[in-house]
């Protein structure tokens, strides 16, 4: 699935109730693909053409390991578990005896961790969702998502981009999903800047089915 859809899904699912959680979820949605973007940017800066990058270098072992780390179920699943363990306790704990709150040796650290836990959860849960979706829609370019325990890959019968394995239809589905997510977020946030970005994303998503409906009709 394309990175922008992962970002929108993360914001929609893990971005409530606070706006800062939406930004954290957006960051988590893009996090698994950061190694790829850094590598591509570096290779382009030293003169490699895009065709060579994705047809040859992408399949090198070192790049596959970078993809494995970015999409690791172990990494993101572990961070989700840690964040859940650190999340503030139920509301009833607020009525604990005063002596409990006077433990100066641990209260500051606990409070800091408790405040950070929702952000960590939004980031890691969004990244884990990204990895799980990619697990289901990558075929020849599948990731080693349990590395370093194993180099096994699940080669899905469905590809999000390859027309030979449903890529065309999945692309249309993804465009429709992206439009729905944008509308959900548009209603949730009233910031003009955020809505302008969402409107631009909406145009880009709408262009995909428009190409297949109108562009392909002339071929």
Image: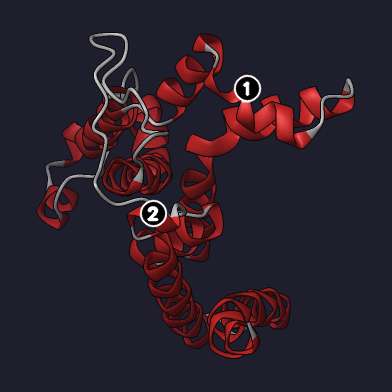
Q: Residue at x 38, y 48 (%)?
A: 126
Residue 209 position (above or below residue 162)? below
In this view of the protein, which residue sits in the foreground, 131 or 194? 131
In this view of the protein, which residue sits in the foreground, 121 or 175? 175
Report the residue marked by disc 1: 56
Residue 147 visible in the picture? yes
Quadrant (top left/top right/bottom left/bottom right) for the C terminus: bottom right
Residue 216 position (above or below residue 134)? below
Q: Where residue 110 appears, x then y in whole percent?
A: 32, 30
Q: Residue at x 59, y 86 (%)?
A: 210
Is label 1 in contact with label 2 (beta carbons under 8 Å)? no
Q: Residue at x 39, y 31 (%)?
A: 71
> How many callouts does the rendering have?
2
Q: Nearer the viewer, mark 1 or mark 2?
A: 2
Sequence-wise, the earlier of marks 1 and 2 is 1
Residue 25, numbered label: none
In this view of the protein, which residue sits in the foreground, 122 or 76? 76
Quarter-of-image position of residue 150: top left
Q: Where residue 46 appears, x then y in whole percent?
A: 88, 20
Give the left or right position of residue 41, taking residue 54 as reference.
right
In space, the residues marked 1 and 2 are separated at their CA atoms by 21 Å
Quarter-of-image position of residue 115: top left
Element at label 2? helix
Residue 73 position (above or below residue 201)? above
Q: Where residue 20 appears, x then y in whole percent?
A: 52, 58
Residue 16 visible in the picture? no
Q: Where residue 142 appears, x then y in whole percent?
A: 36, 33
- Dot 1: few (<14), some (14–19), or many (≥20) neighbours within 10 Å? few
Report the residue marked by disc 2: 164
- Dot 2: few (<14), some (14–19), or many (≥20) neighbours within 10 Å? few
Q: Which color mode does the image show?
A: secondary structure
């Amino acid at each position: 699935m394309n990175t922008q859809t992962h970002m929108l899904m993360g914001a929609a699912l893990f971005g409530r109730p606070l706006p800062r959680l939406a930004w954290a979820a957006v960051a988590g949605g893009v996090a698994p693909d950061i190694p790829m973007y850094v590598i591509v940017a570096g290779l382009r800066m030293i003169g490699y053409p895009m065709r060579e990058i994705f047809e040859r270098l992408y399949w090198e072992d070192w790049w596959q390991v970078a993809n494995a780390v970015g999409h690791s179920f172990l990494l993101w699943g572990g961070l989700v578990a840690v964040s859940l363990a650190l999340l503030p306790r139920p509301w009833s704990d607020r009525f604990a005896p005063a002596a409990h709150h006077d433990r100066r040796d641990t209260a500051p650290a606990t409070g800091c961790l408790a405040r950070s836990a929702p952000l960590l959860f939004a980031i890691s849960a969004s990244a884990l969702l990204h990895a799980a979706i990619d697990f289901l829609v990558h075929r020849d370019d599948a990731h080693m998502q349990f590395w370093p325990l194993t180099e096994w890959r699940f080669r899905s019968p469905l590809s999000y981009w390859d027309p030979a394995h449903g890529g065309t239809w999945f692309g249309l589905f993804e465009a429709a999903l992206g439009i729905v997510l944008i509308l959900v977020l548009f209603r949730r946030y009233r910031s003009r800047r955020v809505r302008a970005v969402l409107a631009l994303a909406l145009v880009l998503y709408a262009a995909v089915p428009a190409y297949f409906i109108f562009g392909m009709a002339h071929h």
